[in-house]
């Protein structure tokens, strides 16, 4: 496109506007996390974008249950939900990626399991709530409600479509000749997969793991339905954070929100190259 | 070699499996796709049968009996009859559709606009691109909380509006019957425009450069190039982006669960949120099962029709040379 000065300014102007809109909510939460109690709302003072007296008090409060500003103490601190989020997201990712990778290879190379591509996609089509009743009954009767394995298992299932499709497109990209050469050398088919193909898609596999992890980490609904107390994840815990004296715990929740927001943003930027492929189930490659 | 392996390892298997396992490719393919198939069996076949069964009864979690005994309150299709007369259900669907038809097109157009700004190189492109993508990576429940804070009547949005207009602005966004849904839409647009931007930009970058150069040589201006070459070439990408967003937006839950809890009243009660309330506040699980099944069938039919249309379109494109 022509680089006339007008276009130059219009472009930067519009991008700047978009950046401001994108950043406002994030910045508001980011600074709120460091504001002491009196600055949370306008009720006690003027609205400021930057904290006047920045403090770590909010973080201290959610981790230790008490801080100078607030009279009430917290009966449940944030470590446990953070641990729950981390553990279930990691295990869910492991389940999805292992099942997805094996299935994808089988479909991509052996044309076996050809029902998988569409069957896993349909897992993403329906609103989860429309199909949750039997899942909740099953989880309850198998004793999996509010357990780490129960939550990890369902995470593994709901993110299976992404893992499967991503890995399928990566396997489809690997030239079949290399594998054929290894076969001629006398490798068994599984050895070819394990020793030849898998190392070739190592970077892609790592990105798939991160991508699926982000999705699992981002869940709110499933944890809301299938956990009660011991294994609530960050978003569920965050929403239950309300002080006994009523009123919103703006600063504390913002601190927790910041903790929840950072990992996916960092990881997301790290795997930017594969985001399009992942989000379109491999239909589009960048 | 393969036959030898089957002999050595599969002698104890039943005959159909032995035949299957005689071939190395078939055996390995079967074993490798097994975990995914089992997960699907576990989450699709089993629950679906259970859902059909429970949906034909009045069973609820407070009955004190296992769902197996739900047949005691068997009522062929009464739940389904009730569903058609359930005004709240249809209203929630209409509300969900409203959010979809307002938010998704806006996200699409904003994303497309942003993508056109990013097609060619300019200083700062990479960093701006990364920042613009951040909203979609933020946990939706957290994004909901961000907007919950922003939309407080004494919050920063009213403050900003007040400064820009010079007037006293005190909208009670989240408890205003008309504004609450707008607030939810704004949050959805904020979070998901980046997804559209990401996908559409990828599609735009995929338009062959030589065609654009050829068009320039033939005297096409940038407007003509955009409408005549870029957009037609991006048709498939645009369809994919739109379909993904429509499907996801239809499920909308997290944002409004945090921002409005379906309120004020039922003003922002979408399909997902209505089902959620039925499940946990009213505990009418049999009715929810029926309702869910109805939604499932309706969406399946829609998806099936869409796939069929796509196939027809593809076949037509194939038979028309040069299209």
Image (spheres, coloured by chain):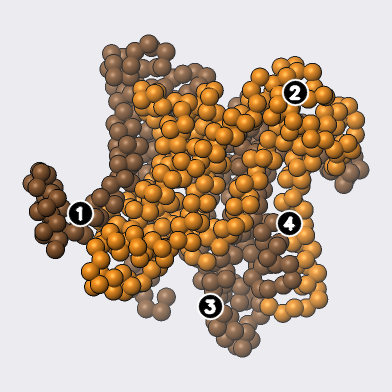
Q: Are marks 4 and 3 on the same chain?
A: no
Q: Are marks 3 and 2 on the same chain?
A: no
On residue A23, the disc is none
Measured as percent of width and height from the top left, residue A180 is found at 27, 72
Please name the residue shown 62% across and 46% down the image: A263
Q: Is residue B315 left or right of residue B102?
A: left
The one nearer the camera, A22 or A145, is A145
Residue marked by disc 2: A66
Measured as percent of width and height from the top left, residue A49 is found at 84, 42
Quadrant for residue A62, please give it: top right
The one nearer the camera, A115 or A95, is A95
Q: Tell which subunit mark 2 falls on.
A: A
Residue marked by disc 1: B27
Q: In the rendered image of this protein, which colour is used for chain B?
A: brown
Residue marked by disc 3: B208
Any part of residue B299 in sight: no
């Amino acid at each position: 496109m022509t680089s006339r000065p007008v276009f130059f300014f219009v472009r930067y102007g519009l991008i700047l506007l978009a950046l401001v809109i994108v950043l406002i909510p994030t910045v508001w939460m980011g600074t709120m996390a460091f504001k002491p109690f009196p600055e949370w709302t306008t009720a006690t003072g003027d609205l400021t974008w930057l904290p006047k007296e920045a403090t770590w008090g909010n973080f201290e409060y959610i981790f230790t249950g008490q801080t100078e500003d607030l009279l009430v103490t917290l009966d449940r601190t944030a470590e446990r939900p953070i641990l729950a989020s981390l553990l279930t997201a990691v295990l869910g990712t492991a389940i999805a990626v292992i099942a997805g990778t094996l299935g994808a290879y089988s479909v991509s190379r052996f044309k076996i399991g050809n029902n998988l591509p569409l069957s896993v996609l349909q897992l993403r089509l329906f609103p989860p709530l429309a199909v949750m009743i039997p899942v909740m009954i099953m989880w309850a009767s198998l004793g999996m409600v509010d357990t780490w394995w129960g939550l990890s298992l369902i995470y593994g299932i709901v993110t299976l479509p992404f893992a499967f499709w991503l890995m399928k497109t990566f396997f489809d990209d690997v030239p079949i000749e290399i594998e054929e050469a290894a076969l001629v050398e006398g490798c068994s088919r599984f050895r070819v997969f394990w020793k030849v193909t898998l190392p070739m898609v190592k970077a892609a596999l790592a990105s798939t793991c991160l991508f699926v992890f982000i999705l699992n980490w981002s869940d709110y609904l499933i944890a809301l339905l299938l956990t009660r107390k011991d294994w609530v994840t960050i978003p569920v815990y965050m929403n239950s954070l309300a002080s006994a004296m009523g009123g919103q715990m703006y600063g504390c929740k913002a601190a927790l929100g910041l903790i929840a927001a950072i990992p996916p943003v960092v990881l997301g930027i790290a795997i930017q190259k594969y985001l399009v492929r992942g989000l379109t189930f491999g239909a589009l490659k960048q | 070699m393969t036959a030898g392996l089957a002999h050595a390892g599969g002698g104890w298997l039943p005959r159909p499996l032995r035949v299957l396992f005689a071939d190395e490719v078939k055996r390995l393919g079967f074993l490798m796709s097994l975990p995914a198939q089992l997960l699907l069996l576990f989450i699709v076949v089993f629950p679906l049968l259970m859902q059909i069964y429970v949906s034909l009864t009045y069973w609820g979690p407070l009955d004190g009996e296992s769902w197996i005994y739900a047949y005691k309150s068997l009522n062929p299709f009464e739940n389904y009859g009730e569903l058609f007369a359930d005004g709240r259900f249809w209203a929630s669907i209409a509300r969900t559709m409203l959010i979809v038809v307002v938010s998704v097109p806006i996200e699409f157009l904003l994303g497309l606009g942003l993508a056109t700004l990013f097609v060619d190189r300019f200083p700062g492109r990479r960093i701006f691109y990364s920042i613009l993508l951040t909203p979609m990576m933020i946990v939706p429940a957290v994004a909901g909380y961000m907007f919950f804070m922003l939309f407080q009547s004494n919050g920063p949005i009213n403050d900003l509006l007040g400064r820009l207009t010079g007037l006293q602005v005190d909208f009670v966004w989240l408890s205003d019957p008309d504004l609450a849904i707008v607030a939810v839409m704004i949050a959805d647009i904020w979070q998901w425009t980046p997804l559209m931007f990401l996908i559409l930009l990828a599609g735009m970058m995929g338009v062959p450069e030589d065609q654009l150069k050829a068009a320039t040589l033939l005297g096409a201006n940038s407007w003509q190039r955009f409408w005549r070459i870029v957009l037609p070439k991006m048709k498939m990408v645009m369809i994919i982006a739109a379909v993904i967003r429509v499907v996801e937006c239809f499920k909308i839950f997290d944002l409004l669960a945090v921002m409005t809890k379906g309120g004020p009243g039922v003003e922002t009660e979408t399909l997902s949120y209505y089902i959620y309330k039925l499940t946990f506040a009213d505990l009418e699980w049999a009715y929810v099962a029926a309702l869910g099944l109805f939604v499932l069938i309706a969406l399946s039919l829609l998806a099936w029709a869409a796939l069929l249309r796509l196939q027809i379109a593809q076949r037509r494109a194939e038979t028309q040379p040069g299209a």
